[in-house]
Image (tube, rainbow, N blue to C red):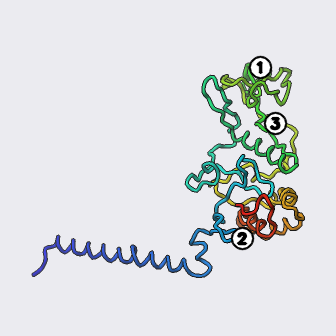
């Protein structure tokens, strides 16, 4: 006896469901798992875990780490990673960028009276990081559009606007990112004395004027030392940033700079396929290698 059409359609659907469940829900996952266990692939499938000299898991070679002490200051015996905006730093559950663009140059100053917290602009983040790296490595951390104290060199200029949007005869000038009682990075602008910024004051009506200053066009502190990656998890730095840090690390570990640079080269990878991207140095692997081959008393067993 021929089954009704609706029953045959339901039976066919059940058969398709069972076949697809076996193929895609059982066979395919088992095949992928089996391939992942092959030599050369297992480590990557398990998360590219890297280990210390005594066999303890120290993290993943794919995720950066912060090599700082309990006080948040950099540990001198370790190469420092690039900044991270992921959570409190390199948090895989909060992978993110700051989402701040190149025109983000004005800070929000702390105003305890109004309960407003300080919020740094992208420019000030770059300037403060550059100054901190320069101080740590003993080089000039100056950058264009940055003040000597490490904030964005931005003026707010008040006065009658010309048709082209400029203010030819300013009546008042404020260093927007330097809260009083800080001394402005320039004392006079277009014949007008520059004031420090008063927290809570609305400066929106003023013309925003970034001041380049006399910093070199090519700063000594590389760009990757002052900017975060898009994911916030990048474990790599440029060879230039690694070479900048090598003298400090060598002194802290009591070894020659040549040995530290040899470790840098050992953990450097070139462009993908020979032409994509730039050469990079894996900081996590590099610091583990230094701990293994040139341990320091303060850093033994870290990261």
Callout 1 environment at 10 Å: few (<14), some (14 to 19), or many (20+)?
Answer: some
User: Of the residues under marks 3 and 1, which one precedes in the sequence?
Assistant: 3
Q: Where in the figure is residue 9, as x and y percent of width and height?
A: 21, 72
Q: Which residue: 84% across, 46% down?
A: 135
Residue 53, disc: 2
Measured Cα–Cα span from mark 3 to mark 2: 41 Å
Which element type, helix, strand or loop, lies under badge 2? loop
Residue under the point 74% across and 59% down: 237
In this orientation, does residue 264 appear? no
Q: Quadrant of the C terminus?
A: bottom right
Q: Which residue is mark 3?
A: 149
Outermost residue toward the front? Answer: 297
Label 3 Cα crowd, 10 Å radius (few <14 / some 14-19 / many 20+): some
**Along the line of sight, the residue nearer the viewer: 138 or 150:** 138
- Residue 104 visible, this orientation: yes
Image coords of residue 142 (percent x, y):
84, 43
Q: Quadrant of residue 37?
A: bottom right
Foreground mark, 3 or 2, reads 2
Quarter containing the N terminus: bottom left
- SS type, badge 3: loop
Rounded to the nearest angstrom, the CA distance separating label 2 from label 1 is: 62 Å
Nearer mark to the viewer, of 3 and 1: 3
Q: Nearer the viewer, residue 47 or 177?
A: 47
Q: Earlier in the sequence, mark 2 or mark 1?
A: 2
Tag 2 and tag 1, C-beta contact below 8 Å = no
In-front residue for pair 255/216: 255
Q: Which residue has dot 1 on it? A: 172
Which is more N-terminal, label 2 or label 3?
2
* CB under 8 Å between discs 3 and 2: no
Query: What residue is at 84 percent from the left and 61 percent from the top?
Result: 253
Q: Quadrant of residue 243?
A: bottom right
Q: Is residue 55 left or right of residue 153?
A: left
């Amino acid at each position: 006896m021929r089954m009704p059409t609706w029953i045959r359609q339901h039976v066919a659907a059940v058969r398709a469901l069972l076949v697809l469940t076996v193929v895609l829900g059982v066979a395919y996952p088992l095949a992928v798992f089996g391939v992942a266990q092959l030599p050369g692939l297992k480590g990557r499938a398990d998360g590219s875990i890297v280990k210390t000299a005594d066999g303890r898991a120290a993290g993943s070679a794919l995720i950066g780490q912060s090599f700082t002490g309990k006080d948040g200051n950099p540990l001198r015996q370790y190469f420092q990673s690039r900044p991270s905006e992921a959570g409190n730093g390199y948090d895989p559950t909060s992978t993110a960028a700051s989402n701040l663009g190149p025109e983000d140059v004005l800070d929000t100053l702390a105003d305890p009276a109004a309960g407003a917290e300080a919020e740094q602009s992208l420019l000030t983040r770059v300037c403060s990081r550059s100054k901190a790296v320069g101080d740590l490595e003993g080089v000039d951390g100056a950058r264009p559009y940055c003040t000597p104290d490490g904030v964005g060199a931005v003026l707010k200029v008040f006065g009658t606007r010309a048709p082209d949007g400029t203010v030819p005869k300013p009546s008042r000038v404020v260093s927007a990112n330097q809260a009083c009682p800080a001394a402005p990075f320039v004392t006079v602008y277009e014949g007008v004395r520059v004031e420090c910024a008063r927290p809570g004051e609305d400066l929106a009506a003023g013309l925003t004027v970034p001041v380049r200053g006399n910093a070199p066009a090519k700063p000594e502190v590389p760009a990757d030392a002052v900017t975060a990656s898009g994911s916030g998890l990048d474990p790599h730095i440029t060879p230039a940033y690694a070479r900048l840090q090598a003298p400090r690390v060598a002194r802290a570990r009591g070894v020659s700079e040549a040995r530290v640079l040899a470790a840098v080269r050992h953990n450097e990878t070139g462009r993908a396929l020979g032409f994509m991207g730039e050469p990079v140095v894996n900081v996590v692997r590099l610091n583990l290698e230094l701990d293994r081959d040139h341990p320091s008393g303060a850093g033994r067993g870290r990261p």
